[in-house]
Image (spheres, rainbow, N blue to C red):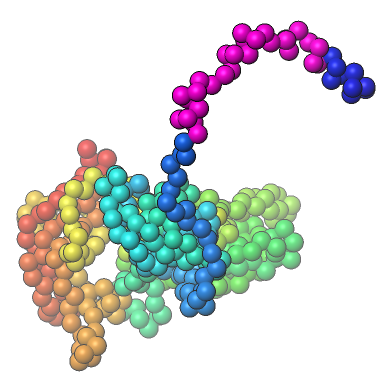
Amino acid sequence: MDIDKELEDIFSDPLMDVSYQEAKLFDVPADMKGVMAQKKDVPDHVAQRKLCENFAQFKLLFEQVHQDLKTGKRQLQRISKTTSLLAGRYYLVDGQMVLLYEIIEKKKGTNGLPDGRTRCIYENGTESDIYLQTLRKNVVASGYAITEILEETDAHFFNPEDVKQEDQVTGYIYVLRSKSENPEIRNIKNLYKIGFSTNRVEERVANAEHEPTYLMAPVEIVSTYKIVNMHSQKFEDLVHQVLQTVNFRFRVADDKGEMHEATEWYQVPLEIIDSIIQKIMNGTIIYFSYNKEQQCLEQRIEKKPSQLNLSGLKVLTLIIEKQYFEEIVSGVKTEEYRSLKQTTLNKYTYIDEADGKRYLRRFDAIRFYVGYHSDRDSAVVQVLDTTYEDGLVTYHLGKVLEVIRGKENK
């Protein structure tokens, strides 16, 4: 190809011929030139990342928050455009953790929300003085808030000696690790089987190398949980529902060569499994999902029909049967009882560090739920008094503050 010839052809094209009158169309009037020459408005200051000189004092804090996410003590939480960001809280933006260390200049933005310069520390050792509203936009668009540490006060998993005679052990949830020599299985990190058995787990897996559900290989029992006073099959279903995005299904041949599908295998950190099981027991699991990318629990923010402002109040959450729920909301049942046992001590009582004695926890209200499904009935009821006698904690109920019916009852 002759480049010079090609260029000559292009510039000799009739379309390139522009008359004087046509060329004048592209002239800018003198008065407009002055306007265009004016300096455009620019921010008085653009936030820039710089090296955080004292990052050493923050490094361990970031590492601890990552550990809290892995163990389920903290979760990720989506926020809205009107959510207030708080100094001292951690956020995740584009996969990077940031600490909103302080808000330097507090003022109100044009939208009425708090704004001002901040000092933000990033886990890569940098910091910036980004505007608060800019940080909020970034979190909303491509990130999460990281929750504060949640105290688990109602763990229903205990050693055999913790189970009292009146407790009913309804089954066992078990977590297994495969000892398969198959590279396709062995090389999958954090691969666990979560299952349920009415018998002792050791008996259930004794023949694992001959059962397709265990991938025709021996297994290691990583952890087991006694399920007390609860429908164990429902418990298992909830575990699998939360972890469905990381479910592995294997096609496995048995000893006779027949093919089977092995399910209930999940790629998830062990600490998250433990946290999920605890949240199932306290009834909060319906508000969480598993974030596969960040490998931690994510708190779902949903618009709830509740219009009740319970901020500043101590609220106890209890799961009850439908019959008792209806009696409470109708005013027939004015007392709710809970047995004080080894497994429920931390939920209903506390130890005062000042004198070392145990006292009843005092609540302003109780939120009752029927069952564990997402569309369940719920009610908030005032607590007038709390008493204890003969191993029973009695909550004396007052006014019914709110009743929310699930979809199936609407």
**59 sits left or right of 75 in the view:** right
- The residue most toward the front is 30
The magenta stretch is 10-37
**161 sits left or right of 28 in the view:** left
Q: Nearer the viewer, residue 306 or 225?
A: 306
Residue 285: image location, x then y, percent = 37, 58
Quarter of the image holding residue 202?
bottom right
Q: Nearer the viewer, residue 74 or 211?
A: 74
Residue 235: image location, x then y, percent = 40, 59
Q: Magenta region, mostly helix, strand or loop? A: helix
Name the image quarter holding the C terminus. top left
**208 sits left or right of 264 in the view:** right
Q: Nearer the viewer, residue 321 or 367?
A: 367
Name the image quarter holding the N terminus. top right
Is 27 in the magenta? yes
Give the vertical position of 370 relative to 363 (above or below): above
Give the vertical position of 277 relative to 323 (above or below): below
